[in-house]
Amino acid sequence: MRREAQERVAELRRLIDYHNYRYYVLDNPEIPDAEYDRLMRELQQLEAAHPELAMSDSPTQRVGATPLKVFAEVAHSVPMLSLNNAFSEEDVVAFDRRAHEGLGHDGELEYAVEPKFDGLAITLHYQNGHFVQGATRGDGYTGEDVSANLRTIHAIPLKLPEGAPPWLEVRGEVLMLKRDFDRLNAEARSRGDKEFANPRNAAAGSLRQLDSRVTAKRRLTFFAYGIGRVEGATLPPSHGEVMDWLGRLRFPVCQERRLVRGVQGLLHYFAELGAKREQLPYEIDGAVYKLNRLAEQEALGFVARAPRFAIAHKYPAQEELTVVEAIDVQVGRTGALTPVARLKPVFVGGVTVTNATLHNEDEVRRKDVRVGDTVIVRRAGDVIPEVVAILPERRPMRDLVTPLHEAFAMPTHCPECAAPVVKLEGEAAARCTNGLSCPAQRKQAIIHFASRRAMDIEGLGDKLVEQLVDKGLIQTPADLYALTVAQVADLERMAEKSASNLIAAIAGSRHKDLARFIFAMGIRNVGEQTAKDLARHFGQLDALMQADEAALMQVPDVGPVVAESILAFFAEPHNRAVIERLRAAEAWQDGEAQPITAGHLAGKTFVLTGTLPTLAREAAKARIEAAGGKVAGSVSKKTDYVVAGAEPGSKYTKAQELGVTILDEAQLLELIGEK
Ligand code: 5U1
């Protein structure tokens, strides 16, 4: 009996380790979750019945252990170095030149390049293929023993396959994926708990928990990027091959790593990775360049605490500290009031930022942002800069207990037109109740109408619209088509030439397709995609204007809220009058109705692989199913589409082999009709 249990336990551990690897490292599970859970439960029951069979590297040990009082210290046998940074092309050129000089090498050098993960460096020790200890970097010489916490990270193997060397130290980074970070913060928010400022802090906070059961509940992951020490095995001659070897030992290695030659290769990689940065499922703050040949790495050696053979090329910081000088309230197109922090200018994300959105009143109160506060500002990609958090310890004090500035409160009257402000139940935004009689809303409506994705009137920017409205030359988008060159030439910073260009651009914006026109009208809750769907479904504006709630809800993704916004918009006599004038100006052209119905993907089979930039796997599946499609677990000749995200698994290769259409997230959304 005992022998039978022993064999089954070994078999279950082998099976679970394998499926764990398929799921967490390859992102390509072979069995359903329920089957995995069944195997795990069986193993837990057997281990409980036979405590003598318990082992620290059993997959059941990933749930966390008894809390520690303190972390033990671990002296690193090989120091955990930091990297020198390069902030400019010149720095990279100088790095490459030093490498040439140090090696006495002519011609281009070969570099192994990969993302610089924004996580926490750790080292993992394996003895005879078993995970025995893991530690943080600490000061580079001594770190903290966080073994119990590392065991809970499913991407870290607890047992290596046959052929692992007797002693192996693997170095890499623990991090939290952006989607897991968002989920963690959403949960914290719903409980009223403090949120983490960024995935790095969340990963650090989770890894440095004395109670590993807490770590087990946070989803952390890991990427290997090097070796600390190895005994009993000869490493291959290049870094790239070492990484491939680690991959075969079932360590997660990053799919974005490449081999490049010379400075041009490095800079090209830097630009390419930078363009992908926002879409990657994890945060990075640069690229790491390493001489690929280990013999060359050894020949160059180290300076102080950093290797000469490697460098981190950093992107401009996406987060910086600055001070809030004022909090203003802006009125948007639909009357929504947005608090905006006016900031002491700060260079962040590659530009100088002076304003950051505070989203809404609840958000300001939750973050407790006040004038005078030192705050973390974040600007990532083209996203509007935002205040992430305040630094409470830097808050100026009037005395020991009273803050210098009061907590923010939303004004009760519109700062632009003094009309009362309301906050509707279930809505985060407070709104001015004055509609298009409010000059701010009127300006925003016209700015939106003229914008690139709407009527695309070149040269009609915010400042010009402001002047036109303030001078009483225009009140609605329809007035644009009645403007004259003389009227425009009189405005500040305008002359005859620029005025006639603008009038020509306004005239040239006519005859837009119906979808753009619907979007340009700025109906609440009607974005570009809904506008496209409505245009396609109804074909003509009159048909849309006459549609009742039931007819509107025939359009996929139009629910009661969107339908209600459309009905309210067309019920407004002022809006109907403006539309009639725009009809007379021939602002749009009607088309043919091509009614769309839900379920247009009926009969189509999809397979998901890799991490999509914004949609979690479940969300992508739900959308496909809502459109009538089916999601399968593996690729076959019957698969119609494979949807691939970052780091796709073998399903991607299989799809290529079988010639199955491969979609990215944007293409999927387009197919579903959401884009
Ligand atoms: N991706 C990556 N990050 N990182 C950090 N590779 C890498 N290598 C490092 C460090 C400190 O050090 C080795 C070059 C020794």
Image: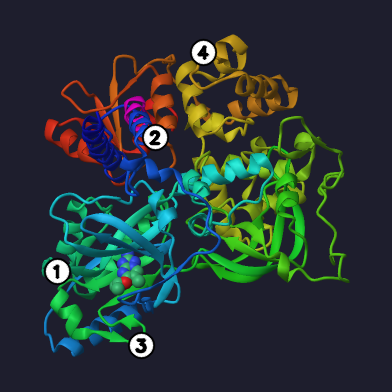
Sequence-earlier tag: 1 or 4: 1
Q: In this rendering, would 383 be left or right of 240?
A: right
Report if the CB atoms under discs 3 and 4 are less than 8 Å apart: no
Q: Which residue is drawn at 43% across and 26% down?
A: 623
Q: Which amino acid does label 1 sit on?
A: Ser
Q: In this view, does 546 lie above or below 520?
A: above
Q: Looking at the rendering, in which quadrant would you find the C terminus?
A: top left
Q: Mark 1 points at which residue?
A: 238
Q: Residue at x 32, y 56 (%)?
A: 223
Q: What residue type is labelled 2?
A: Ala
Sequence-earlier tag: 3 or 1: 1
Q: What segment is highlighted magenta in the picture?
A: 34-40
Image x and y of residue 377, in percent: 60, 62
Q: In this rendering, would 548 be left or right of 267?
A: right
Q: Mark 2 points at which residue?
A: 48
Residue 411 magenta: no
Report if the CB atoms under discs 4 and 2 are less than 8 Å apart: no
For mark 2, give the secondary structure. Answer: helix
Q: How crowded is mark 1: few (under 14 residues within 10 Å), some or many (20 or more)?
A: some
* Disc assigned to residue 554: 4
